[in-house]
Amino acid sequence: MTRYGLMLALLLGSASAGLAQQATDSVAPEAPTAAPETAPAPDAGFGPLTDASRAGLIAKSEGRPVTAGNWMVSAAHPLAVEAGAKILETGGSAADAMVAVQAVLGLVEPQSSGLGGGAFLVWHDSSSGETTTLDARETAPRAVTPTLFQNEQGEPLEFMEAVVGGRSVGVPGTPALMEEAHRRWGRMNWAGLFEGPIRLAADGFTVSPRLASLVAEEGEALQRYPATTDYFFPGGQPVAAGSMLTNPAYADTLAQLAADGADAFYRGEIAHEIVAAVRGAEDNSGHMTRDDLAAYRVIERPAVCVEYRDHDVCGMGPPSSGALTVGQILGMLGGYDLAALGAESPESWRLIGDASRVAFADRERYMADPDFLAVPTRGLVDPAYLAERGQLLSGDDSLPEVSPGSPGWAHASLWGRDESLELPSTTHISIVDGDGNVLSMTTTIENGFGSRVMAAGFLLNNELTDFSFRTHDDEGRVIANAVAPGKRPRSSMAPTIVLKDGAPVMTIGSPGGSRIIGYVARAIIAQIDWGMDIQQAISAPNLVNRFGPMDVEPGRSAELAAGLADLGFEINETALTSGLQGIAITPDGLQGGADPRREGIAIGG
């Protein structure tokens, strides 16, 4: 059975919406590049690399951070990191470097992010000392209806039936974010940021083993539409590791962006190609129009911050659930001495696991696009509320069950329990520039290879499937994350900047669907409570709990798993393909880390 067949079987066999979500979330579309303890060796299938890239790969394989005194970039592919490093070493800002990094990631890691998707960005400005966030989440086209993902009988579609095709495509936000970040914080010429990515797309790049294996694993699911098939299956065969792959259509798209800015994407020929692809997927066509693209806007929102051990942990608020849920987990753990317990203690992980379960109960009930409904953002991270919720963890065994709490703004408590499914095809970029500006950006096309629809050289997202397929829960309550025209689906992306005494000390984030929240919380705890350096914090074993069972990486935490089973947890061994990219800002300089489960590296100067 294929993994998509398994996914559908799990969905169909579930007894409830909650079980369906748990079953689907257990299937990870992106497999790990390697076992976390055996990171790829230098030059492992990437083609020619710079000395700095090889040094980054060596550091990751040896489990130690990259160090630098001036600037640092950590991202999911060596070629993308090299593009950002070239900008930073010539005096560019973190915003300048991000534009180049994202442009290359869309080429070399197309299954995870790109121009056809959306992103959240957290920025700490060194001159003003302010931390802000930019919301570039995809939006639903104006013509969608509440029954977008329901059949004629009013029942939810099978998940992959909804994903593949134009129906699932939201209006992309990433190009608008690239331009907005550059307008606010960039220093270098906009067009010049695209020179390297355009050359790479036109001349070709070496297909990495990871990309080749993911394409081959997709098989028929990636061959429904001619443009996608022609690109990923040249001559009828999946792209091979080590082969050269060119993308002249993507080079032309980048050239148009370089010349005319984001207007080229949202109002020009690229917009025409996107709409034609979405509406032309005749077996599952979508609703997007050129007016939808022209109306897209990036929204600045206040950062959501929670205090943890004399640190401020700041991130992206709704429509992302990332900062709220990470913040709730940390806030509930504030009264417990994780440092004394240690990283190998089942009791530490009982507390972390149950705090996550409690936070996820609130996430399912309350979190969605704040422009469409009241979200009790302040109430959810109010210290008194988190202290009260944290008392639930004071027992000796795992909690038998969890339920949503009653945060401030009680009128929001009438929302129904959500059942939306979020899958882990995403990537993360962390950058610190020479002036001390800090960027944390998580970017996505949602499912692996998104909607499988390609336009103008890039894949289009399937972000609308992050909405709930149902409009009401079983008790008749309206679901906050139901689809609506112009609405932004809830996300788990958690780009995070950690500050102490107002100064940034860490930037971190990860792909991984709804498990992103657990990955990011664990990395923060590992550094603050357990004293790990940034690479150790990223490489440490993943244990994640969202709905009751404790997900554990196979072969990495056998003693912990046994101890947690004794405490009453159901243990689920499964690949936990985080892609953490992080930078620590220390008194001695910068330390960069990259997740050994994927292809990323850190480069500093």
Image: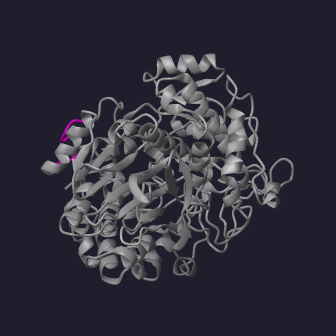
Figure check: 214 above or below 543: below
In this image, 43 relative to 424: left or right? left
Q: Residue at x 18, y 48 (%)?
A: 47
Q: Which corner quadrant of the image does residue 217 belong to?
A: top left
Camera-nearest residue between 4 and 543: 543
- Is 43 colored magenta in this rendering? yes
Q: Residue furthest right?
A: 475
In the rendered view of the protein, which quadrant contains the C terminus? Answer: bottom left
Q: Residue at x 74, y 63 (%)?
A: 146
Spot occupied by residue 222 in the image (x, y as percentages of width and height): 45, 50
How many numbered marks appear? 0
Spot occupied by residue 261 in the image (x, y as percentages of width and height): 37, 80
Q: Which corner quadrant of the image does residue 564 belong to?
A: top right
Q: Main secondary structure of the magenta part?
A: loop
Q: How is the image coloured?
A: one colour
In this image, 359 relative to 276: left or right? right
Figure check: 406 above or below 259: above
Camera-nearest residue between 67 and 588: 588
Spot occupied by residue 50 in the image (x, y as percentages of width and height): 14, 51
- Is 417 colored magenta in this rendering? no
User: Is residue 1 at all visible to an observer of this figure?
Assistant: no
Q: Residue at x 24, y 45 (%)?
A: 66
Which stretch appears magenta?
40-47
Spot occupied by residue 254 in the image (x, y as percentages of width and height): 31, 72
User: Is residue 86 at all visible to an observer of this figure?
Assistant: yes
Camera-nearest residue between 250 and 477: 477
Q: Residue at x 37, y 48 (%)?
A: 581
Figure check: 369 above or below 335: below
